[in-house]
Image (cartoon, rainbow, N blue to C red):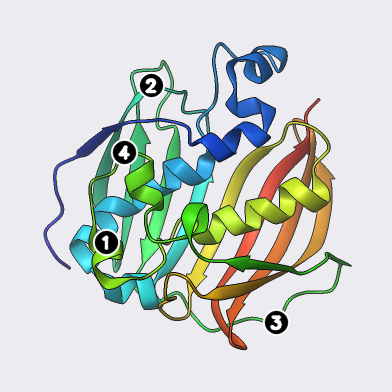
Amino acid sequence: MSAWPEAWSITAQNLPEHARNPIHTDAGAHAAGFPRALVAGVTTYAYLTHPVVAAWGLDWVANGGGEVRFRRPVFDADVVRCEVRPDGEAAVVEAVTDEAEQPRAVFRAVRAGGVVAALRDGEALPAKRVELRGEWGSDYGARAGDPFDLYQQHGVVHPAVWPALANHLVHTEVARGSWVHTRSIVRHHGLAPAGATAEVRGTVVRRFQAHGERAVLDVHITIDGQVVASLEHEAIVALP
């Protein structure tokens, strides 16, 4: 394992497209009982991947994976410190802010994401075709304030795009009003060239109640018939 930095810090910010979910605006956050806009979980995830890719490089982007859990909100303009500790062959990255309870999110990264598992039975969602540029391209991290330019240099899609595309399914097909991304298991199955067209397929495999109505999705993202990323993705789709 490469040496890990003691910590990496960044000021969290929402991207313009996240205003589609009212929880990422001050007004929507206030309506849901929060003091100010929540930063999108996928943006926090983008920050958490920074030290992983700095240590493991493009091999992790192509073949790695891990599980991220969002325990408490990161708010717009929070300073987020990404603190890393080894965990056997894995690495655990925690997002820490100056709020009272920490960590805000935890990402357990692994070098090998594993094989592609079939989508489980459930509520099949309409497939989406998405061009992997702009908000779905190589510069997701840069647009969120991260100067790490490895993805632009190599013309490949930022790994935060995969849960962002799963969120796209949640937003357009499952959620009712404001919703909150809570957890993802992400597996990488190859590098994805920026500008390619991806097909996003998903199935709702479970619904349950826990601080609102939650949905668990299986998601496959394919380019030219090859799955480049697969996810188990959970969100609160109807707030209490």
Q: State which tag comes first along the sequence, 2 or 3.
A: 2
Q: State which tag comes first along the sequence, 1 or 3.
A: 1
Indicate whether 202 appears above or below 92: below
Read off the residue under disc 1: 53
Q: Position of residue 110 (x, y in %)?
A: 37, 67
Indicate whether 43 appears above or below 160: above
SS for tag 1? helix
Quick check: 41 left or right of 127?
Answer: left
Q: State which tag comes first along the sequence, 4 or 1.
A: 1
**Most foreground residue, 109 or 149:** 149
Q: Residue at x 47, y 32 (%)?
A: 14
- The amino acid marked with disc number 3 is Ala
Tell me the quarter of the picture where residue 108 sits.
Answer: bottom left
The crowd level at tag 2 (other Cα within 10 Å; few <14, some 14-19, many 20+) is: some
Read off the residue under disc 2: 77
* Residue at the extreme bottom: 225
Q: State which tag comes first along the sequence, 4 or 2.
A: 2
Q: State which tag comes first along the sequence, 4 or 3.
A: 3
SS for tag 2? loop
Residue 118, which numbered label? 3
Asked if the residues shown at circle 4 and circle 2 are in contact, with their CB atoms under 8 angstroms apart, the answer is no
* Location of the N terminus (image quadrant): bottom left
Read off the residue under disc 4: 145
Do we see residue 86 in this rendering? no
- The amino acid marked with disc number 1 is Val
- The amino acid marked with disc number 2 is Ala
